[in-house]
Image: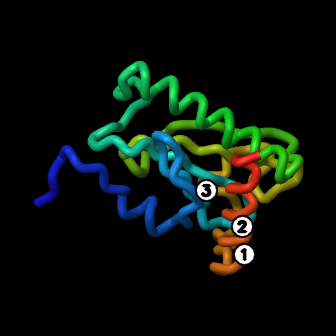
Amino acid sequence: MSDASIFVLDPRLETDSFPVAELKLATLRLMDDSRFPWVILVPRRPGLAELIDLDPADRAVLTGEIDAVSRALRSLTDCDKLNVAALGNMVRQLHVHVIARFEGDAAWPGAVWGAGGERQSYGAPQAMLLAGRLRGALAA
């Protein structure tokens, strides 16, 4: 039996991503699909499903973290577009996607969910290299 007052990362998010950094509010993770530079921010608060479930102070912190992560990802990738979304249709736990998109990528101009072709997993060394670059860009 789990304690509803303790934050636990949804097992699907944990399985489908690599750890990048612990921000003030959110854990930052790299999604395991090398076709798209794609991270998620998961606020370390139990029982959240929607942005409106955050108290106003935490919502402001998360907005700042989304901004910082978006800027870091854009600076690293020189992407054509950033997609930022909190959907939660497959995984109910509140998480925010930040995805660097490129004209001509495997899903362009559509959504990355259900994109043509199979997910292309990172090898652990490649994921850790990108995670380290993201940490460096966030620190800059």
Q: Position of residue 107 (x, y in %)?
A: 75, 53
Quickly name the residue at label 3: 114
The reply, left or right, for residue 77 in relation to residue 55 is right
Distance of label 2 from label 3 (alpha carbons): 15 Å
Q: Residue at x 45, y 59 (%)?
A: 13
Residue 116, x across and y down, in percent:
70, 61
Q: Give whichever of discs 2 and 3 has the lower sequence position.
A: 2
Gap in angstroms between the C-alphas marked 1 and 2: 9 Å
Tag of residue 8: none
- Where residue 70 appears, as percent x and y from the top left, is 71, 40
What residue do we see at 73% from left, 65% from top? 130
Determine the residue positioned at 76% across, 39% down.
71
Q: Which residue is mark 2?
A: 34
Q: Is there any visible trace of residue 32 in the rendered image?
A: yes
Residue matched to label 1: 126
Q: Earlier in the sequence, mark 1 or mark 3?
A: 3
Mark 1 nearby-residue class (10 Å; few <14, some 14–19, many ≥20): few
- Marks 1 and 2: which is nearer the front? 1
Q: CA distance from mark 1 to mark 3?
A: 23 Å
| Pick the front one: 120 or 51 | 51
CB under 8 Å between discs 1 and 2: yes
Observer-side mark, 2 or 3, equals 2
Vertical placement of residue 29 versus 95, above or below: below
At label 2, the amino acid type is: Ser
Above or below for 19 versus 48 = below
**Up/down of 53 relative to 56, above or below:** below
The reply to whether residue 37 is in sight is no
